[in-house]
Image: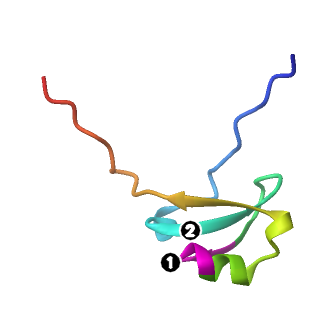
């Protein structure tokens, strides 16, 4: 069985929060970003990109006990 390494997402920063980003297949470059997935897909070649939505860094669920 082959071990898959987690991608390095250090390129994503605060300016990408609440936006969609298109990353290169190797996760080494941000190709584009946009507020909507539809407009982001129009900006990029869909075969050569990984799309993801970036949540705010402080967006976590608080567990109440």
14 inside magenta stretch: no
Read off the residue under disc 2. Answer: 20
Of residues 55 and 28, which is closer to you in this image?
Answer: 55
Of residues 36 and 58, which is closer to you in this image?
Answer: 36
Number of residues whose C-alpha sits closer than 10 Å to that of mark 1, classed few (under 14), some (14–19) or many (20 or more): some
Residue at 50 percent of width and 77 percent of height: 35
Say left or right for 48 vs 17.
Answer: right
Q: In the picture, residue 51 is in which quadrant?
A: bottom right
> Which quarter of the rendering shows the C terminus?
top left
The single residue placed furthest to the top in the displayed view is: 1
**Colour scheme shown:** rainbow
Q: Which residues are magenta?
A: 32-38
On the image, the x and y values in percent for residue 44 come to 76, 77
Residue at 21 percent of width and 31 percent of height: 63
Number of residues whose C-alpha sits closer than 10 Å to that of mark 2, classed few (under 14), some (14–19) or many (20 or more): many
Of residues 65 and 30, which is closer to you in this image?
Answer: 65
Q: In the picture, residue 50 is in which quadrant?
A: bottom right
Residue at 70 percent of width and 36 percent of height: 6
Read off the residue under disc 1. Answer: 35
23, above or below 64, in the image: below
Say left or right for 46 vs 58.
Answer: right
Residue at 87 percent of width and 16 percent of height: 1
Of residues 11 and 43, which is closer to you in this image?
Answer: 43
On the image, the x and y values in percent for residue 38 come to 61, 78
| Image marks 2 and 1: residues in contact by CB distance under 8 Å | yes
Check disc 2 and report its element: helix, strand or loop: strand
33 inside magenta stretch: yes
Q: Which mark is residue 62?
A: none
Measured in 3D between alpha carbons, the distance from the residue under mark 2 to the one under mark 1, in whole angstroms, is 6 Å
Check disc 1 and report its element: helix, strand or loop: loop
């Amino acid at each position: 069985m082959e071990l898959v390494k987690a991608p390095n997402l250090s390129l994503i920063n605060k300016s990408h929060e609440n936006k969609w980003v298109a990353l290169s297949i190797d996760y080494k470059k941000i190709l584009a970003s946009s507020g909507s997935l539809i407009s982001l897909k129009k900006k990029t070649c869909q075969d050569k990109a990984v799309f993801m939505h970036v949540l705010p860094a402080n967006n976590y669920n608080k567990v109440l006990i």
